Amino acid sequence: MPSPLHQTLLGGERRNRVIDLCYLRLWARHIISEAEALILVQPVTPDEIKQTVFDIDEVKAPGPDGYSSGFFKAAWPIVGEEVTRAIMEFFMTGRLLKQVNSTLISLIPKVTTPTVVAEFFFG
């Protein structure tokens, strides 16, 4: 059976549990205070989510669909509520939609006519 720490870090009831991490002090450079720990487990708010999105530079963080943060800022009156709901659900459940967790890999040739994978840059 997984330990409470294992369950907390990997799913389980991580938002409802405070763990005594004193036994890790030997390896830690800084141990946060109980007050700091309580701040870290507070539910995120819609305002925090919006502020975080709006703090990202317009041309940064495009997703696999090509939409950058600039798109989300411009379309916030339309998509903001749904984006906020999805993010809050992630923080409450720990589950992320498969569609959100995807990545594109671009292969950029190092040579004119690549024939093996080693002849590509990964971008």
Image (tube, rainbow, N blue to C red):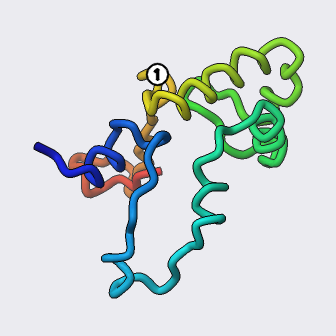
Q: Is residue 92 left or right of residue 59?
A: left
Q: Is residue 13 left or right of residue 42?
A: left
Tell which of 109 and 84 is nearer to you: 84
- Count of picture labels: 1
Decide: is 4 above or below 86.
below
Q: Is residue 113 left or right of residue 29?
A: left
Q: Residue at x 46, y 22 (%)?
A: 97
Please identify the quadrant where the N terminus is shown. top left
Q: Residue at x 20, y 51 (%)?
A: 3
- Residue 76: give x, y in percent of width and height: 85, 22
Based on the displayed image, in which of its 4 quarters is residue 35 positioned? Answer: bottom right
- Residue 12: give x, y in percent of width and height: 33, 36
- Residue 25: give x, y in percent of width and height: 38, 82
Tell which of 41 and 110 is nearer to you: 41
Q: Is residue 63 left or right of residue 75?
A: left
Q: Residue at x 83, y 12 (%)?
A: 78
Of all residues shown, which one is farthest toward the left? 1
- Residue 99: give x, y in percent of width and height: 47, 21
Q: Residue at x 43, y 28 (%)?
A: 95
Decide: is 57 above or below 81.
below
Disc 1 target residue: 97
Type of amino acid under label 1: Leu
Based on the displayed image, in which of its 4 quarters is residue 89 positioned? Answer: top right
Decide: is 95 above or below 111.
above
Decide: is 26 above or below 102.
below
**Tag 1 secondary structure:** loop
